[in-house]
Amino acid sequence: MDLTFSERETAFRDELREWLAVNDPGPEPLHGFDPHFAWRRDFQRRLYAGGWAAPHWPREHGGRGATLTESAIFFEELGRARAPLPANVLGLLLGGPTLMVWGTEEQRDRFLGPILSAEEIWCQGFSEPQAGSDLAALKTRAVRDGDGWLVTGQKVWTSAAQYAKWCMVVARTDAEAEKHKGLTYFLMDMEQPEVQVRPLRQMTGESEFNELFIEGARIADENVIGGVGNGWKVALTTLMNERAGLGFFLQVRMRQLLDDLIDEAAARGLLDDDVIADALGALHVKTEVVRLTAYRGLAAVERYGQPGPEGSLTKWMWSDANQQLAQLATRVLGAEALVAGSRWGYELLRARGYSIEGGTTEILKNIVAERVLGLPRG
Amino acid sequence: MNFDLSDDQRTVKTTAREFLAARYPLSEVRRLALEDERGWTDDQWREMVELGWPEIAELGIVEMIVVAEELGYALAPTPLQSTWAAGALGADISASRGAVVFDGLAADAGTADEIVDWEGAVVTGAEVEPVRALDPTRRWFRVAGGSRSDGGSDVERGRGVAIVMNAAESVGVAARAMEMAVAYAKERKQFDRPIGSYQAVSHACAQMLLEVEGARSAVYWAAWALDHEPETAPLAIACAAAYAGDAGRRVPRAALQVHGGIGFSWEHDLHFFLKRGEANAHAYGDASGHRERIAALTGL
């Protein structure tokens, strides 16, 4: 057991810290999604120029061949520097790694470079109005049309779709096959009139996500990933990557949020209030436990070659703790936390999504119960 | 960074698991708890001495908590943990047993060769009266009067070792209670289905795993910090104690609920785990006390 960074890991961290110190991303634009996305895109271009866009990618594809721990350090440091996630996070974390497993050489040559440089933004077309947790129930269908495919259907909760060039779409290509078969994974060009993007207004009042209306969009045969009828397996590769690394960024962000709340409580003289101090202490413990369990998860991957249950556990712990934190802020700040447009008011509402997006807490519990504890399926 | 047991530490764990499984089947735990007045046998103590367990802290605190967790998992009635705690607080435990007085009470004081208090002072000539505790797997005593030496040196660290060792035991208690609940949920059928196929039950079991793994993460961190990073140890210890103390009682409670009526019966073994978890959550300070300490340490 060793909880210190090795020499190599420390060197990696120091080099990154130095880079971040001279490449300050600047203040986060607080109003409007377009300026915010532009800020993230600009930051990714700088990461790319510095060779930092995707440290976890192999060197041959423009990464640094970073280990899992180094990749965790990368995301922790971004969070610590209050830098944003790169604009093309879906391409960097999901799309690229999926192509590295399932893509052809031509596909990797064509797509990986523009993902890194943020020249082509990627989005993820998985969820549908009738297929959320039950992804394989999706209804979007693709039919043969000459040397390509015509896709029709509706996707929902698609972030960054309004900026995206490519969308990872899972569609049904064989209506007769079983539910998990007959699916195919495509890369769909977003720049065609058959794809309509409509912002989806969420309960915070903003539009982080979109709905996609796809009416006979054309996809060339060369943009099938992993073969026709193999879409479920390819989609699982994408989903397996969903929580990798990102967790460390989110955990640092939670830590900062907690520190800020402690400052707010101190400014109001509330640290002597036993109830508030106990609640802040409990959140401190939970925040540490998320970080520690995430690091144990990395060790498990290194030992066993595959992610253990920790990925599901840490996401669940994180969303729970973050919601409690946002809730506690209303006690610390009182009615001030309920002012529309205020930071804590935003957190209070935004945190409700954390236990839904990226796997609902209930689905995570099912995964833990069935795959880790071996309980029978309901 | 490698937040995992080393191969040697794994060997310690496997040895402990196998030895304790062989010597302390739950029937033996029950016999010692309910029928043996002293609560442990000479042979059992001698074998632990032969394994080098009383002095295991010399290998490292991580090694110690690995065994402590297994002792909790087996629910082995033994004065070993009291001896460790006393040794950490400065008692001379070479070839003997110790006990620690906290809040006027001390586990295993009746059979201890040396008793120390929470300040690390050696207690001599005290009145030691048995207390019938809710947890029958450990012998408790009220310790009053007598004289006390000057406090020990490095008491802070000694307390930390005792607290983390106790927290590690709670992780084992919780892990075993969870295993019992999961096994029962697979086998018990109602409405023609294993009850574990109902999400009300399976999600309760998933929650147990979250708490067991979370507690284990915090305890490993604290033990490692005691060995290698003394400056972060106080905070790590308080986090481990707060989280594992709660897990050690919450998980057996939930496991009992999964068992339904049988779990509430005297004949079932689950109540021993619930009682130990509850007792551990109060030994050396409770969770809210540890959170207060976190508040003080982080400048809250």
Image (cartoon, coloured by chain):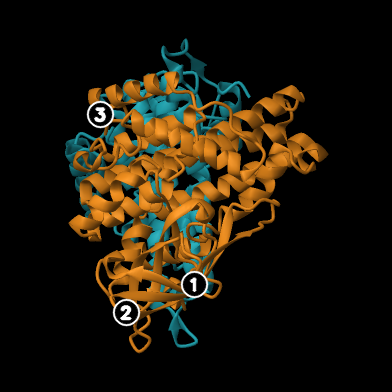
Chain colours: A orange, B cyan
The residue furthest right is A335
Does residue B106 appear anywhere in the picture? no
Determine whether B265 is above or below B129 in the image: below
Label 1, label 3: how far apart the Cα atoms are:
40 Å
Percent of width and height locating residue B113:
35, 27
**Image position of B135 (left or right of A377):** right
**Disc 2 target residue:** A181
Percent of width and height locating residue A132:
51, 69
Tell which tag, 2 or 3, sits nearer the viewer. 2
On whether disc 2 and disc 3 are found on a single subunit, the reply is no
Percent of width and height locating residue A48:
35, 34
Of the residues shown, which amino acid type is indicated by label 1?
Answer: Ile
Determine whether A128 is above or below B80 in the image: below
Label 2, label 1: how far apart the Cα atoms are:
44 Å
The quadrant of the image that shows the C terminus of chain A is: bottom left
**Disc 1 target residue:** B262
Tell which tag, 2 or 1, sits nearer the viewer. 2
**Disc 3 target residue:** B55
The chain letter under disc 1 is B
Determine whether B263 is above or below B60 in the image: below
Please tell me in which quadrant of the rendered image residue A353 appears.
bottom right
Foreground residue, B244 or A150? A150
The quadrant of the image that shows the N terminus of chain A is: top left
Kindly state the secondary structure of the residue where label 1 is placed.
helix
Q: Residue at x 42, y 75 (%)?
A: A151
Of the residues shown, which amino acid type is indicated by label 3?
Answer: Glu
Please tell me in which quadrant of the rendered image residue B270 appears.
bottom left
